[in-house]
Amino acid sequence: MKDNKTIAQFLGITEFPYKIKDNNGNTIYIEYSNGNWHKQEYDSNNNQIYYEESRGYWSKYEYDSSGKEIYLETSLGTIRDNRPKVIELTFEDIAQKFGIDVNLIKIKK
């Protein structure tokens, strides 16, 4: 038989809600007396990048350098993708696009 104890049950915690925080003070796990729980993960800028709850719901997030959300995906099928699109081209691709000899391409700063 598999042991499916929650963290609080495993530790014998009796005072609820039971919370675990990271070094930045973000609550990364919370459990209630009924056994329901949810957990979060944060990036180095304290932006929430993952959320999961005991009922099976989860969500993932990404942020740009200014902290603006640029990606969201959930277990319910929601996807919001505002990440910058990167186009990768070879020098040959560029030369062909502009109709010039590849040896004439130089990159300037």
Image: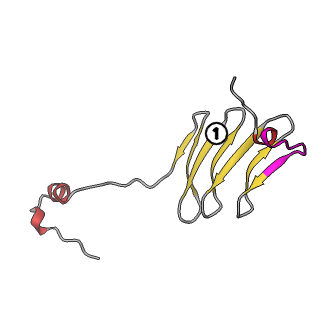
Magenta part mainly helix, strand or loop? loop
Q: Mark 1 points at which residue?
A: 58
- Corner quadrant of residue 55: top right
Instruction: Tell me which residue sits at (58%, 59%) in the image.
Output: 68
Instruction: Tell me which residue sits at (73%, 42%) in the image.
Output: 38
Query: What colour scheme governs how the chains and residues are painted in the rendered image of this protein?
Result: secondary structure
**Where is residue 54 drawn, in percent x and y?**
72, 35
Left or right position of 86 against 8: left
Judging from the image, what secondary structure is the residue with disc 1 in?
Answer: strand
Quarter occupied by the N terminus:
top right
Image: 82 above or below 79: below
**Where is residue 56 drawn, in percent x and y?**
67, 33
Numbered-mark total: 1
Instruction: Tell me which residue sits at (72%, 30%) in the image.
Output: 3
**Where is residue 82 drawn, in percent x and y?**
50, 51
The amino acid pointed to by label 1 is Trp
Left or right position of 36 against 77: right
Left or right position of 73 against 90: right
Quarter occupied by the C terminus:
bottom left
**Where is residue 8 drawn, in percent x and y?**
80, 42
**Direction front: furthest residue:** 1
| Of 22 and 43, the residue lying toward us | 22
Left or right position of 38 against 75: right
Instruction: Tell me which residue sits at (86%, 44%) in the image.
Output: 13
**Direction bottom: furthest residue:** 109
Label 1: how many Cα within 10 Å (few below 14, some 14–19, many 20+)? some
Q: What stretch is highlighted in magenta?
A: 10-19
